Amino acid sequence: ARAVVALGLTLRERERMGARRPLASVTVVSHDPAVVELLRGRDNSDILGELNVKRMEVSSDDTALVDLAAKPNLKLLGKRLGGKLRAVSAGLQGLGQAELRAFAAGGPLTVEGEALQAEDVLLVRAPKPGLVVASEGALTVALDTAVTEALRLEGLAREIVNRVQNLRKTADLDVSTRIQITLRCGGALAAAAQQWGELIRGETLANALEILPPEASSEPTLAVDEIDGETLGLGLVPAT
C-alpha cells in the first residue's frame, strides 16, 4: 500500500497535478498473484485518501493501461545482424499488440527470419491517452487524468479550504477556533463554494460561509488570492 501511494504521489508531482485536486481512479497492476490478492483483499480507503482518488482497481493485466512498442537492443543486435538490422527494426515497429504481448509473456518471436530472444528486444510501454503510468518492482500504478466538471469543482473547493487554513494561521487563530468565512468570487470558484459549501465549512470549522460577487464591498477582506486564473477575496472572523 505504501508503494502504491509513493508511485501515485510521484506521478502527481511529475505531471504537476496538485494533491488537492481529486481524480477519478487509480489502477494498480501486478503480475504477482500474491500482490493482486493482497490488494484486492484489504480496505484500500487509506490509498484512496492519500492519493485523493475516487476509485481503485487492481489487475494482473496492463492491457487497458499501456500500448507496447518494440525496438532492437542495438548493443546485442548491431554486430550480429549487420546490414539486416534496419529491416529487423522496421519489422519490430510493425508488430501488433497481440504479438508483442505474447512475446512479453515469454513466447517466441521471429522477425525477418531472425529468431529473437527477450534480451534482443527492448519493450517500451506507452500510457494510453488520459493515463499517466509509473512502475517499480512488481507494481505498476496508473492515474486517470481526465477531470470532469464535478471533479474540477471539488478540487477548487479544496483549494479554497487551503486558502482559508493559511489565512487562519496568518490571523493567528487557533486551529480549533470556530470561524465565519466571507468569500468574494465568481465563475467556477463561486460554483465550487456553493456546491461544496458543507465540505468547506466542515474542513475549516466554519459556522457560516457567505459567498458574495467579486464586486461586492465587504469587511473584513483579509486576503486576495488567485486560483486557476480566478480572483478570490477572502475574509474570516471568529464565530460569535
Image (spheres, rainbow, N blue to C red):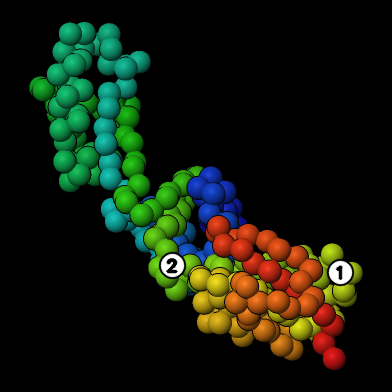
Q: Residue at x 43, y 49 (%)?
A: 133
Q: Residue furthest bottom?
A: 240
Identify the residue at horizontal 32%, vertical 30% (top origin): 122
Q: Residue at x 53, y 82 (%)?
A: 195
User: Disc 1 or 2, which lies upstream in sequence?
Assistant: 2
Farthest residue, direction left = 113
Residue 167 in the image: state x and y as whole percent. 78, 67
With respect to residue 151, does 228 lie above or below?
above
Cα distance in 3D space between marks 1 and 2: 35 Å
Residue at the spot of label 1: 171
Please provide percent x and percent y for residue 60.
35, 57
Q: Quick check: 216 left or right of 236? A: left
Mark 1 or 2: the one toward you: 1
Residues at discs 1 and 2 in contact (Cβ within 8 Å): no
Q: Position of residue 138 (x, y in %)?
A: 46, 49
Does the rendering let one see residue 34? no
Q: Which residue is the site of mark 2? A: 24
